[in-house]
Amino acid sequence: MSFNLIESVKEILSGDMTNRMAGILGESPANVQQAIQGIIPAILTGLMLKTDSGDVQDTLNLATAAARIDIPFNLNSLAGGTVNSKGMDFLKNIFGEKTSVLSDAIAGYAGISSQSSSSLLSTAAPAALGVLGNHILNSNMNASGLRSFLNSQKKKVLNVLPTGIFLNGIMGIDDLSGIAEK
């Protein structure tokens, strides 16, 4: 059976974890679940776009670094809507100055505060990168292999990317219709 990146990340950020995050952030579990459903494919789409733009080695290094430091899911860091600084560093590496725009888009999509959205993004980014990094390390993948792997995952990721998240401009693309062909 082939590795499914989106499902592997979803497994980490599902059910009980989502309910605990909702309780810590003071948000409804349904809204946090909706946010996570948008956050995971948004982060993975950002990684794919970063790779497509020629930053394959940087993406590989970022993911393997996340896997090697075995980032724990310290849910206490979510208390009061605080942001995981390492997670925010990962997000800024992927999205640059558009990180706050993405956070606002997720907040609007899921009906949560921007502060909660930022906190969830900074928790999900290390999780997504860690899952990808572990797959890279377990497969002994190089930059070329990473590019091929991410290309094989595009349709799966884009199929679950919610239309309610305004990605046009946030991720530096004008039209999602052409991304699957890249």
Image (cartoon, rainbow, N blue to C red):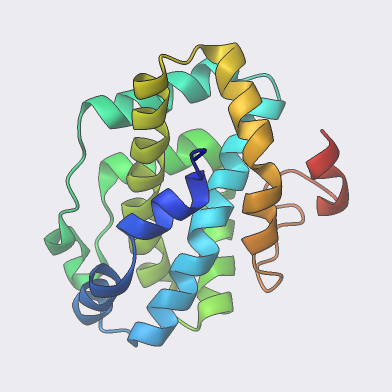
- Tell which of 35 and 26 is nearer to you: 35
Could you tell me if residue 96 is visible in this image? no
Q: Position of residue 174 (x, y in %)?
A: 84, 49
Q: Is residue 61 left or right of residue 20?
A: right
Residue displayed at 36% across by 62% down:
120
Q: Look at the image and tell me in which quarter the C terminus lies.
A: top right
Q: Is residue 58 left or right of residue 74?
A: right
- Tell which of 155 and 129 is nearer to you: 155
Could you tell me if residue 122 is visible in this image? yes
- Tell which of 24 and 69 is nearer to you: 69
Relative to 43, residue 164 above or below: below
Relative to 173, residue 83 above or below: below
Relative to 105, residue 27 above or below: below
- Tell which of 40 and 142 is nearer to you: 142
Residue displayed at 19% across by 76% down:
24
Number of callouts in the render? 0
Residue displayed at 45% across by 43% down:
91
Relative to 56, residue 121 above or below: below
Q: Position of residue 11 (x, y in %)?
A: 35, 58
Q: Position of residue 162 (x, y in %)?
A: 65, 68
Q: Is residue 176 left or right of residue 111?
A: right
User: In which quadrant of the rendered view does residue 173 lie?
Assistant: top right
Q: Is residue 53 left or right of residue 41?
A: right
User: In which quadrant of the rendered view does residue 117 lie?
Assistant: bottom left
Q: Position of residue 126 (x, y in %)?
A: 33, 43
Residue displayed at 68% across by 74% down:
164
